[in-house]
Image (cartoon, rainbow, N blue to C red):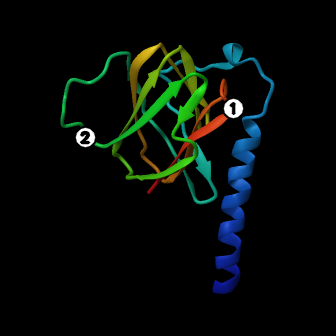
Amino acid sequence: MSPALGRLLRPTALTVSTLVLLAGCGSSQDPASSSPPASESASASESSGSSSPSPSSGSSASSDPEEAGTVVAITIADGTASPQGKAMQVAIGEPVTLRVESDAPGELHIHSTPEQELSFEAGTTEDELTFDRPGVVDVESHDLGQLLVRLEVR
Protein backbone atom coordinates (compact mmCIF):
# COMPACT_ATOMS: atom_id res chain seq x y z
CA MET A 1 0.00 0.00 0.00
CA SER A 2 1.29 3.45 -0.85
CA PRO A 3 2.04 5.89 2.00
CA ALA A 4 -0.56 8.35 0.65
CA LEU A 5 -3.27 5.68 0.66
CA GLY A 6 -2.27 4.68 4.21
CA ARG A 7 -2.65 8.28 5.39
CA LEU A 8 -6.15 8.39 3.87
CA LEU A 9 -7.24 5.06 5.32
CA ARG A 10 -6.14 5.69 8.94
CA PRO A 11 -8.65 8.49 9.67
CA THR A 12 -11.37 6.50 7.90
CA ALA A 13 -10.62 3.41 9.99
CA LEU A 14 -10.63 5.50 13.18
CA THR A 15 -13.96 7.10 12.23
CA VAL A 16 -15.53 3.73 11.43
CA SER A 17 -14.23 2.27 14.73
CA THR A 18 -15.66 5.22 16.65
CA LEU A 19 -19.04 4.89 14.92
CA VAL A 20 -19.17 1.17 15.70
CA LEU A 21 -18.42 1.91 19.38
CA LEU A 22 -21.08 4.62 19.50
CA ALA A 23 -23.63 2.39 17.76
CA GLY A 24 -23.22 -0.07 20.62
CA CYS A 25 -24.40 2.70 22.95
CA GLY A 26 -27.80 2.77 21.30
CA SER A 27 -28.81 -0.76 22.22
CA SER A 28 -32.04 -1.22 24.11
CA GLN A 29 -30.59 -3.96 26.30
CA ASP A 30 -31.44 -3.73 30.01
CA PRO A 31 -28.19 -2.58 31.71
CA ALA A 32 -29.05 -4.39 34.95
CA SER A 33 -29.08 -7.77 33.20
CA SER A 34 -25.76 -7.31 31.41
CA SER A 35 -23.50 -5.43 33.79
CA PRO A 36 -20.19 -7.15 34.48
CA PRO A 37 -18.79 -6.91 37.98
CA ALA A 38 -16.49 -3.96 38.66
CA SER A 39 -13.62 -6.35 39.33
CA GLU A 40 -13.58 -7.61 35.74
CA SER A 41 -10.92 -6.20 33.50
CA ALA A 42 -11.96 -4.51 30.28
CA SER A 43 -10.40 -3.42 27.04
CA ALA A 44 -11.27 -1.04 24.23
CA SER A 45 -10.58 -1.71 20.58
CA GLU A 46 -9.21 0.54 17.94
CA SER A 47 -7.93 -0.42 14.51
CA SER A 48 -4.36 -0.37 15.83
CA GLY A 49 -4.81 -2.06 19.21
CA SER A 50 -6.77 -2.16 22.42
CA SER A 51 -6.69 -0.88 25.97
CA SER A 52 -7.22 -2.95 29.07
CA PRO A 53 -8.14 -1.06 32.21
CA SER A 54 -7.62 -2.54 35.64
CA PRO A 55 -10.28 -0.94 37.82
CA SER A 56 -10.22 -0.36 41.52
CA SER A 57 -13.15 1.49 42.94
CA GLY A 58 -13.96 3.37 46.07
CA SER A 59 -16.82 5.54 47.16
CA SER A 60 -14.89 8.20 49.01
CA ALA A 61 -12.72 11.06 47.84
CA SER A 62 -8.97 10.60 48.03
CA SER A 63 -7.21 12.33 50.89
CA ASP A 64 -3.86 12.30 49.06
CA PRO A 65 -3.30 15.79 47.64
CA GLU A 66 -0.57 14.52 45.31
CA GLU A 67 -2.41 11.98 43.18
CA ALA A 68 -0.47 10.12 40.52
CA GLY A 69 -1.79 9.91 36.97
CA THR A 70 -4.69 11.69 35.35
CA VAL A 71 -7.81 12.77 37.22
CA VAL A 72 -10.96 13.19 35.14
CA ALA A 73 -13.45 15.37 37.02
CA ILE A 74 -17.06 14.64 36.03
CA THR A 75 -19.90 16.73 37.43
CA ILE A 76 -23.55 15.73 37.12
CA ALA A 77 -26.20 18.13 38.42
CA ASP A 78 -29.85 18.71 37.52
CA GLY A 79 -29.67 16.22 34.63
CA THR A 80 -26.65 17.89 33.00
CA ALA A 81 -23.11 16.53 32.84
CA SER A 82 -19.73 18.14 32.38
CA PRO A 83 -17.45 17.58 30.49
CA GLN A 84 -19.26 16.73 27.26
CA GLY A 85 -17.16 14.86 24.70
CA LYS A 86 -13.78 15.99 26.01
CA ALA A 87 -10.80 14.24 24.38
CA MET A 88 -7.89 13.45 26.69
CA GLN A 89 -4.60 11.67 26.10
CA VAL A 90 -3.34 9.31 28.79
CA ALA A 91 -0.15 7.31 28.96
CA ILE A 92 -0.03 3.53 28.95
CA GLY A 93 0.28 2.31 32.54
CA GLU A 94 -0.74 5.68 34.00
CA PRO A 95 -3.60 5.53 36.51
CA VAL A 96 -6.75 7.34 35.38
CA THR A 97 -9.07 8.37 38.22
CA LEU A 98 -12.70 9.09 37.34
CA ARG A 99 -13.90 11.50 40.04
CA VAL A 100 -17.68 11.86 39.84
CA GLU A 101 -19.54 14.55 41.75
CA SER A 102 -23.26 13.97 41.32
CA ASP A 103 -26.53 15.07 42.88
CA ALA A 104 -28.06 11.63 42.18
CA PRO A 105 -26.87 8.02 41.85
CA GLY A 106 -26.09 6.70 38.37
CA GLU A 107 -23.73 4.71 36.15
CA LEU A 108 -20.82 5.45 33.87
CA HIS A 109 -20.32 3.16 30.91
CA ILE A 110 -16.71 2.49 29.95
CA HIS A 111 -16.85 1.49 26.28
CA SER A 112 -14.20 -1.13 26.01
CA THR A 113 -14.20 -4.85 25.31
CA PRO A 114 -15.87 -6.14 27.37
CA GLU A 115 -17.87 -3.08 28.32
CA GLN A 116 -17.77 -2.03 31.94
CA GLU A 117 -20.29 -0.15 34.07
CA LEU A 118 -19.21 1.85 37.11
CA SER A 119 -21.98 2.75 39.56
CA PHE A 120 -21.83 5.87 41.69
CA GLU A 121 -23.90 7.34 44.50
CA ALA A 122 -24.94 10.94 45.11
CA GLY A 123 -21.90 12.84 46.36
CA THR A 124 -18.30 12.18 45.31
CA THR A 125 -17.12 8.81 44.02
CA GLU A 126 -13.75 7.81 42.59
CA ASP A 127 -12.87 4.86 40.37
CA GLU A 128 -9.34 4.20 39.13
CA LEU A 129 -8.46 2.50 35.84
CA THR A 130 -5.05 1.65 34.39
CA PHE A 131 -4.60 0.94 30.68
CA ASP A 132 -1.84 -1.37 29.46
CA ARG A 133 -2.30 -1.08 25.67
CA PRO A 134 -2.98 1.80 23.26
CA GLY A 135 -6.51 2.53 22.06
CA VAL A 136 -9.58 4.72 22.47
CA VAL A 137 -11.93 4.38 25.45
CA ASP A 138 -15.22 6.30 25.61
CA VAL A 139 -16.79 7.14 28.98
CA GLU A 140 -20.54 7.79 28.75
CA SER A 141 -23.64 8.34 30.81
CA HIS A 142 -26.44 6.35 29.22
CA ASP A 143 -28.94 7.90 31.65
CA LEU A 144 -28.14 11.31 30.17
CA GLY A 145 -27.33 10.02 26.68
CA GLN A 146 -23.97 11.82 26.67
CA LEU A 147 -20.39 11.05 25.75
CA LEU A 148 -18.45 12.57 28.65
CA VAL A 149 -14.81 11.78 27.87
CA ARG A 150 -12.85 10.06 25.11
CA LEU A 151 -9.57 8.71 26.48
CA GLU A 152 -6.81 8.23 23.90
CA VAL A 153 -4.37 5.78 25.46
CA ARG A 154 -0.86 6.13 23.96
The residue identified by callout 1 is 145
Q: Secondary structure at mark 2?
A: loop
- Up the image or down, 31 lies above or below 145; here it is above
Q: Position of residue 71 (x, y in %)?
A: 35, 39
**Residue 149 shows up from this direction:** yes
Q: Nearer the viewer, residue 131 or 84?
A: 84
**Residue 1 shows up from this direction:** no
- Up the image or down, 108 lies above or below 9; here it is above
User: Which mark is drawn over residue 68?
Assistant: 2
Direction from residue 80 to residue 13 in the image, left or right: right
**Label 1 environment density (alpha carbons within 10 Å; few <14, some 14–19, many ≥20):** few
The tally of labels here is 2
Q: Residue at x 38, y 15 (%)?
A: 59
Residue farthest right in this picture: 28
For the residues marked 1 and 2, what is the alpha-carbon distance in whole angstroms?
Answer: 30 Å
Foreground mark, 1 or 2? 1
| Quarter of the N terminus within the rendering | bottom right
Q: Residue at x 66, y 78 (%)?
A: 6
Q: Amino acid at mark 2?
A: Ala
Q: Residue at x 53, y 14 (%)?
A: 104
Q: Amino acid at mark 1?
A: Gly
Q: Secondary structure at mark 1?
A: loop
Direction from residue 58 to residue 143 in the image, left or right: right
Q: Nearer the viewer, residue 62 or 50?
A: 62
Q: Position of residue 150 (x, y in %)?
A: 54, 47
Q: Position of residue 131 (x, y in %)?
A: 43, 43
Sequence order check, earlier mark of 1 and 2: 2
Residue 140: image quadrant is top right
**Label 2 environment density (alpha carbons within 10 Å; few <14, some 14–19, many ≥20):** few
